[in-house]
């Protein structure tokens, strides 16, 4: 893109990549043409072209209730700010009603999800065209900053047919997934922010499990993990310790409880095998085999009792 040249406080010229069937055709224009923008997007993060068919994808961050994924095409209107996803957005100045002069054709997201179970901020995203993960071929890989979940969305003829959760990374309110991008070979990279004032951010790869047996051998039920002595009260077994965090994540009204279990008894000659290494400046280090548990409850209508929604278990390798 050519930088704009200011003359007498006016924009003299600018190069714009027009979004049409032939993407990336550079056109010199005096002002932005309607064809290079699409109305109804709130806060796209991020956009990406499919390297095979040129389709433009946009993950659009919501406001109160919905996160959405859109396929960008000429003549479409994606509804913000009188809609959030496919829902009427009554809190806007339009009170959920389309404007009298609606520009373009109103189009629903190809996929959307609510602010539940820690999900609150979509992070795009690209269509996988690599070679190492054939099961992901042609799927849109994206994540959520709040929950740490990463998904693979399958779309056929503009309609979502499946949305597979690939993994859920442990995050906190001060960190989170910042980007989902492909490396030079088209393989997924997950960028995770570090704590404020530190250099503890990380980049991770998504790789398939070594073999199907290693996956199927994992406990399929919470009762099989040995974490809780009582699944009704969630009373933990000995050695599973409850803990709290200084800056808990936003969970849209859900109650979150956390436990951890460190292997060994602290007597191993190598401290790294069964002890937590504390640091005032950097992230604490936990020994391999440490188990972290995060449990979500939602309040019932009586405002006093809760119903279980989800339990996450992460084992540190």
Image: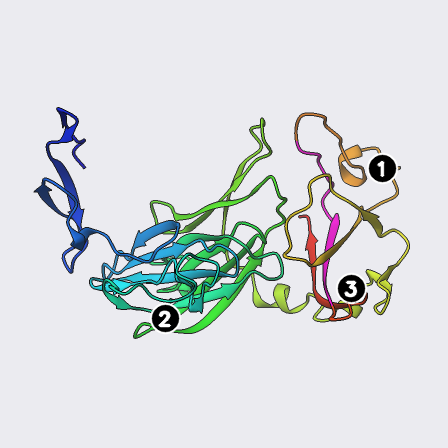
Residue nearest the observer in this picture, 211 or 7: 7
Q: Residues within 10 Å of mark 1 (few under 14, many from 20)?
A: few
The Cα atoms of the two marked residues, 2 and 1, are separated by 51 Å
In the rendered structure, find residue 206 and report the number of the disc placed on it: none
Q: Residues within 10 Å of mark 2 (few under 14, many from 20)?
A: some
Q: Position of residue 30 (x, y in %)?
A: 10, 39
Residue nearest the observer in this picture, 201 or 233: 233
Q: How has the structure been colored for display?
A: rainbow
Outermost residue to the right: 238
**Magenta highlight on residue 297:** yes
Q: The residue tagged with tag 2: helix, strand or loop? A: strand
> What residue would you read off at disc 2?
155
Q: The residue tagged with tag 1: helix, strand or loop? A: loop
Residue nearest the observer in this picture, 243 or 10: 10
| Residue 253 visible in the shown view | yes
Q: Residue at x 84, y 45 (%)?
A: 264
Q: Position of residue 85 (x, y in %)?
A: 42, 64
Q: Position of residue 171 (x, y in %)?
A: 61, 46
> What residue would you read off at disc 1?
268
Res 308 → quadrant: bottom right
Q: Residue at x 63, y 63 (%)?
A: 214
The Cα atoms of the two marked residues, 3 and 2, are separated by 35 Å
**Magenta highlight on residue 121:** no
On the rendered image, what quadrant is the N terminus found in?
top left
> What residue would you read off at disc 3?
225
Question: Closer to the observer: label 3 or label 2?
Answer: 2
Q: Are marks 1 and 3 in contact (CB under 8 Å)?
A: no
Q: Are marks 3 and 2 in contact (CB under 8 Å)?
A: no
User: Nearer the N terminus, badge 1 or badge 3?
Assistant: 3
Residue nearest the observer in this picture, 100 or 116: 100
The span picked out in magenta is 283-299
């Amino acid at each position: 893109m050519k930088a704009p040249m200011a003359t007498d406080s006016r924009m003299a010229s600018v190069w714009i990549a027009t979004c049409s069937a032939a993407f990336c055709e550079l056109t010199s224009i005096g002002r932005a043409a309607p064809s290079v923008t699409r109305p109804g997007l709130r806060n796209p993060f991020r956009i990406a072209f499919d390297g095979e068919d040129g389709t433009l994808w946009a993950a659009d961050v919501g406001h109160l209730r919905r996160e959405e994924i859109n396929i960008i095409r000429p003549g479409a209107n994606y509804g913000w700010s009188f809609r959030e996803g496919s829902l009427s957005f009554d809190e806007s100045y339009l009170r959920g009603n389309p404007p009298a002069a609606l520009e373009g054709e109103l189009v629903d997201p190809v996929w959307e999800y609510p602010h539940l179970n820690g999900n609150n901020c979509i992070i795009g995203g690209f269509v996988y065209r690599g070679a190492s993960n054939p099961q992901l071929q042609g799927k849109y890989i994206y994540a959520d900053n709040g929950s740490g979940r990463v998904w693979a969305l399958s779309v056929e003829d503009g309609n979502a047919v499946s949305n597979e959760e690939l993994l859920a990374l442990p995050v906190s309110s001060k960190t989170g997934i910042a980007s989902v991008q492909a490396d030079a070979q088209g393989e997924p990279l997950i960028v995770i922010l570090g704590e404020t004032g530190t250099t503890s951010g990380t980049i991770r790869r998504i790789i398939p499990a070594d073999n199907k047996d290693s996956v199927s051998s994992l406990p399929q039920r919470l009762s099989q993990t040995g974490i809780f002595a009582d699944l009704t009260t969630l009373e933990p077994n000995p050695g599973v310790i409850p803990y709290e965090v200084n800056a808990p994540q936003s969970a849209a009204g859900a109650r979150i409880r956390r436990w951890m279990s460190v292997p060994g008894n602290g007597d191993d000659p190598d401290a790294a095998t069964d002890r937590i290494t504390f640091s005032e400046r950097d992230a604490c280090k936990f020994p391999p085999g440490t188990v972290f548990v995060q449990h979500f409850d939602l309040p019932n209508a009586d405002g006093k009792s809760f119903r279980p929604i989800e339990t996450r278990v992460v084992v540190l390798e």
